[in-house]
Amino acid sequence: MRIGRQWGLLSLLVLALGAVSCWPSRRTQKTVIAPAPRPTPVLQPKHEIPPPQLPSPPQIDLSSVSVPPSATPEKPPELPPPPKKRARAYPSEVPAQHPAPTPADLRPIFTPQQRQALDRLISERLGRARQALVTLQGRQLTKKQSDTVLQIKVFILQAEETRKRDPVRGSNLAERADILARDLLDSLR
């Protein structure tokens, strides 16, 4: 047991000394920067070579050449005009050649009973919203509450305008007016 302990201490000592000798503070590496290489001079030729001499062009006597009169056109033929370049247009800028088709009307079709029930619901909601506005008439309101009253009035007007054309939208607008009016009344109590 004692020998195993000595070996353990000895191996620990060897490892400790080995680790200390590897410390970066003991080893300093010097960075050597090599100087830039000198540019090599461009060698100029010692004597200049003259360009080669070409023979002179031959002389042509045009007086001896005759062209028949029918071969020379009096005026050049007319060429068709070049095609115009078309600028690339974005889809929103493409001119409409045909009138755009009207979108399909996808509103639900109601039976007369359903139409009456929806119209009754719109009237009830608008009545409650109007009654709330009457209740709020004499009260002192903050800026936010006054804005809410204005929004309720807008919803009531929009619901009245759309209830005949689009009863579902009219019902939604009347519902918004009713909910806003109830919330405003509850906040003042």
Image (cartoon, rainbow, N blue to C red):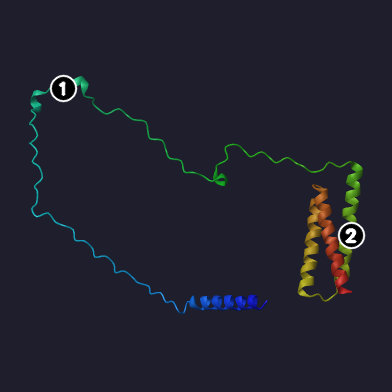
Kindly check if marks 1 and 2 are in contact, taking CB atoms under 8 A apart as contact.
no
* Viewer can see residue 163: no
Residue drawn at x 76%, y 69% as measured from the top left = 147
Which residue is labeled 2 in the image? 127
Q: Secondary structure at mark 1?
A: loop
Q: Is residue 61 shown left or right of residue 39?
A: left
Residue drawn at x 82%, y 54% as measured from the top left = 172
Q: Secondary structure at mark 2?
A: helix
Judging depth in this view, the residue of 134 and 169 nearest the camera is: 169
Q: Look at label 1 and name its amino acid.
A: Val
Instruction: Locate the C terminus and report the quarter of the image it occupies.
Output: bottom right
Mark 1 or mark 2, earlier in chain: 1
Which residue is labeled 1 in the image? 67
Whole-angstrom CA distance, mark 1 to mark 2, is: 103 Å
Q: Is residue 124 shown left or right of residue 151?
A: right
Quarter-of-image position of residue 82: top left
Q: Is residue 109 shown left or right of residue 7?
A: right
Residue 148 rendering spot, x and y as whole percentages: 79, 67
Judging depth in this view, the residue of 7 and 74 nearest the camera is: 7
Residue 157 rendering spot, x and y as whole percentages: 79, 58
- Specify few, some or many for label 1: CA neighbours under 10 Å numbering under 14, 14-19, or 20 or more: few
Q: Look at label 2 and name its amino acid.
A: Gly
Residue drawn at x 37%, y 31% as measured from the top left = 80
Query: Is 178 above or below relative to 23?
Result: above
